[in-house]
Amino acid sequence: MAQIAVIAKENYPLYIRSTPMENELKFHYMVHTSLDVVDEKISAMGKALVDQRELYLGLLYPTEDYKVYGYVTNSKVKFVMVVDSSNTALRDNEIRSMFRKLHNSYTDVMCNPFYNPGDRIQSRAFDNMVTSMMIQVC
Amino acid sequence: MADKVLFEFLHTEMVAELWAPHPDPGPGGQKRSLSILESIGFRVGQALGERLPQETLGFREELDVLKFLCKDLWVAVFHKQMDSLRTNHQGTYVLQDNSFPLLVPMASGLQYVEEAPKFLAFTCGLLCGTLSTLGFQSLVTTSVTSLPACKFQVVIRKP
């Protein structure tokens, strides 16, 4: 079981996909609450005198059933990924590489002249990439 | 080596195409063509603002973003860096390019100064679009006193 969401910098969703299809409302709610944690991490990074500002935010918060991971781009677009806690085979590097693939595909969507920045993402190429990632996770 | 000129030729044709049907459109028509060029530049800037900083780490403040524009964006599009960046530390920045590649083939001196804004509109939009993706609302204006040097004035609007 996994869900992936892409959220614009104004904090509205550009793309939400979950498998299985039920429990979507619960997932939307989870993504919404995780945005608070994301914002907290971003502002914490700004205040700390750290030279490196990482894009990958790591594990945002674990619940008893799920683990939520976050990633923010330079344009303040956030990616949130929720995976089953029972899926212990997933390691940090794999999550990082999945986020990098998401970032690359999102950049491709942005460069598509038929895409208006701020609209929901309807690109089939993006869909296919997300589908293949979810198959990898589940 | 030829890839530099490809964009210059494309840009020249873009400007020529917008001016071709009405070579002397008067102030109203001219403004419309300039704003078309700017909006094309804006959309390109939005996409570049997503693709170029992809590997770099987060920008810590406004000045970092402006430095990114002067170095990485300028190098990616024009294969050279901006010559100077000045600021009043209150949201106004002046970017100066002493030999702007899109103006270099035109003249070197005072000839064609009135025609220069047409050839800078796309670049203004480009700067504005990149800044907008990176989270800043801005107003970009240009001034040319003698080709091929030009100044871009960027005013970041406070939210």
Image (cartoon, coloured by chain):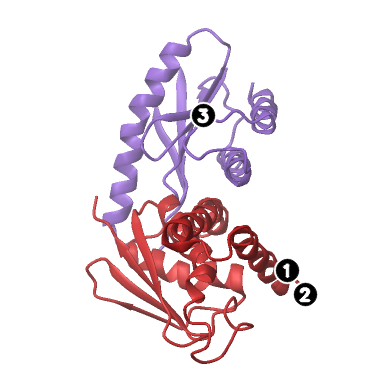
Chain colours: A purple, B red
| Mark 3 and mark 2 residues within 8 Å of each other at the beta carbon | no
Above-or-below relation of B123 to A20: below
> What residue occupies the far bottom of the structure in this picture?
B109
Judge by depth and name the residue closer to the eye, A98 or B41. Answer: B41
Task: Tell me which residue sits at (66%, 71%) in the image.
Answer: B8
Name the residue that disc number 3 marks: A120
Q: Which numbered circle lies on residue B2? A: 2
- Residue type, label 2: Ala
Please state which amino acid type lies under the numbered disc 1: Leu
Of all chains, the one bearing label 3 is A
Please say if the residues under marks 1 and 3 sit with CB atoms less than 8 Å apart.
Answer: no
Q: Which quarter of the rendered picture does the N terminus of chain B lie within?
A: bottom right
**Which of A89 and B114 lies nearest the eye of the viewer?**
B114
Choose mark 1 or mark 2, whichever is in front: 1
Answer few, some or many: residues within 10 Å of disc 2's Cα (few below 14, many 20 plus, some between 14 and 19). few
For residue B108, above or below residue B91: below
Q: CA distance from mark 1 to mark 3?
A: 33 Å
Is the Cβ of the residue at disc 1 closer than 8 Å to that at disc 2? yes
